[in-house]
């Protein structure tokens, strides 16, 4: 399976420019899992120790509601990268995520990856730049979803 994961990661724009050793590191820390519809990938305010790549399927990123339905911020599909909280202290999820359809998802061990980034600063810098863009996209989507929910537009 690790060869299949490596081949998949090499094809994703998110990981473009990583060298062979860096891709080897990511692959060695990756596992594949299948999520059923409505199955939670992670829950806000719990420990964030991984990030996820959607290989096939759809996952909703949500803000939990005090009552009623959660506010869907984004829907991510094939190739979508999910989760940045593993990289930023205090390493707690800021959102909920759940599968919206049967989903094949790759999980990468964020704790061990952070350790690798401490010795491979180039890898750490490349990932930080990419996850910073992901954070900005997620926060902008949150703002847009909140405005739409509040105004009805």
Image: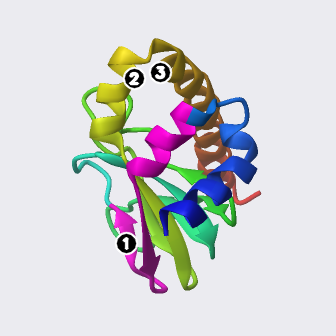
Marks 2 and 3 close (CB-CB < 8 Å):
yes
Q: Residues within 10 Å of mark 1 (few under 14, many from 20)?
A: some
Q: Nearer the viewer, mark 1 or mark 3?
A: 3
Q: Nearer the viewer, mark 2 or mark 1?
A: 2
Q: Which residues are magenta?
A: 21-42
The residue pinned by badge 3 equals 124
Residue 40 marker: 1
- At x 55% / y 66%, what residue is drawn? 60
**Quick check: is 131 in the magenta stretch?**
no
The first of marks 1 and 3 along the sequence is 1
Give how far across and how far down residue 63 sits, in percent. Answer: 45, 55
The first of marks 2 and 3 along the sequence is 2
Give how far across and how far down residue 17 sits, in percent. Answer: 72, 29
The quadrant of the image that shows the C terminus is bottom right
Q: Is residue 80 visible?
A: no
Q: Which quadrant of the structure image shows residue 75?
A: bottom right
19 left or right of 122 in image? right
The residue pinned by badge 2 equals 117
Task: Check the image and report above or below for 114 versus 111.
Answer: above
How many marks the image carries: the answer is 3
């Amino acid at each position: 399976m690790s060869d299949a994961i490596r081949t998949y990661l090499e094809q994703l724009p998110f990981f473009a420019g990583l060298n062979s050793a860096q891709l080897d590191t990511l692959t060695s820390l990756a596992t594949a899992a299948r999520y059923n519809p409505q199955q939670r990938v992670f829950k806000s305010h719990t420990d964030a120790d991984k990030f996820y790549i959607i290989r096939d399927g759809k996952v909703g990123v949500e803000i939990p509601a005090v009552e009623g339905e959660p506010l869907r911020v984004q829907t991510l599909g094939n190739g979508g990268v999910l989760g940045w909280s593993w990289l930023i202290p205090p390493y707690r999820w800021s959102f909920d995520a759940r599968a919206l359809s049967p989903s094949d998802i790759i999980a990468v061990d964020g704790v061990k990856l952070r350790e690798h980034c401490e010795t491979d600063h180039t890898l750490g810098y490349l990932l930080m730049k990419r996850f910073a863009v992901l954070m900005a996209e997620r926060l902008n989507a949150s703002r847009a979803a909140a405005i739409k929910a509040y105004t009805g537009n």
